[in-house]
Amino acid sequence: MRYMLMMHAPRGTGDYQVGNWKPEELQAHIGFMHALNKELTNAGELVGAEGLAPPGAAKLVRAPKNGGAPATDGVFPETKEFLAGFWIVDVDRTERAYEIAAKVSAAPGPGGAPIFIPVEVRQVMSAPPTDV
């Protein structure tokens, strides 16, 4: 079963709060993420993982109703959290996806303390078979 684990960061100013961390704190955090990705790769569970640019660099694109160029919007200030990164894992049971998400949630932050960041877990659905 495939699951997407989505790490949500508090909105704050719309920038990543990690920009305010000490360099060694950020290095420890990134080192944790690299070690986790290696662990998941070695277990055959990692399908993909990426960090995302902050919301200020994001655009929401909609196809126009009357043709022409696509419509774009910037970020939405009322958003309480934003997607900071994601993993797609292929695991044999739902509980394993939850275990991985809990590990991500407890990644080290300032002073090495766990940050307890929220991680949304959603099963990746497959399309019904098509007759081609």
Image: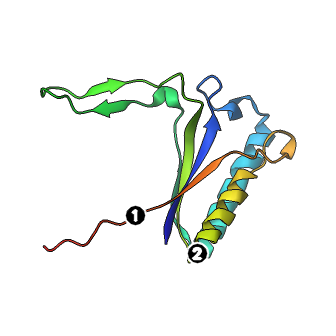
Q: Are marks 1 and 2 in contact (CB under 8 Å)?
A: no
Q: Nearer the viewer, residue 29 or 116?
A: 116
The C terminus appears in which quarter of the rendering? bottom left
Q: Which residue is mark 1?
A: 125
- Whole-percent x, y for residue 21 in the image: 76, 33
The foreground one among 61 and 108 is 61
Residue where numbered disc 2 is placed: 93
Crowd around label 1: few <14 · some 14–19 · many ≥20 (10 Å): few
Q: Which of marks 2 and 1 precedes in the sequence?
A: 2
Q: Secondary structure at mark 2?
A: loop
**Residue that appears at 54% across and 51% down:** 86
Q: Is residue 1 left or right of residue 73?
A: right
Residue beneath the point at 56% across and 72% down: 45
Gap between marks 1 and 2, in whole Å? 15 Å
At horizontal 78% and vertical 48% (from top left) the residue drawn is: 108
Q: Which mark is residue 59?
A: none
Q: Residue at x 30, y 65 (%)?
A: 127
Q: Which kind of residue does numbered mark 1 sit on? A: Met
- Residue 1 shows up from this direction: yes
Q: Position of residue 117 (x, y in %)?
A: 70, 45
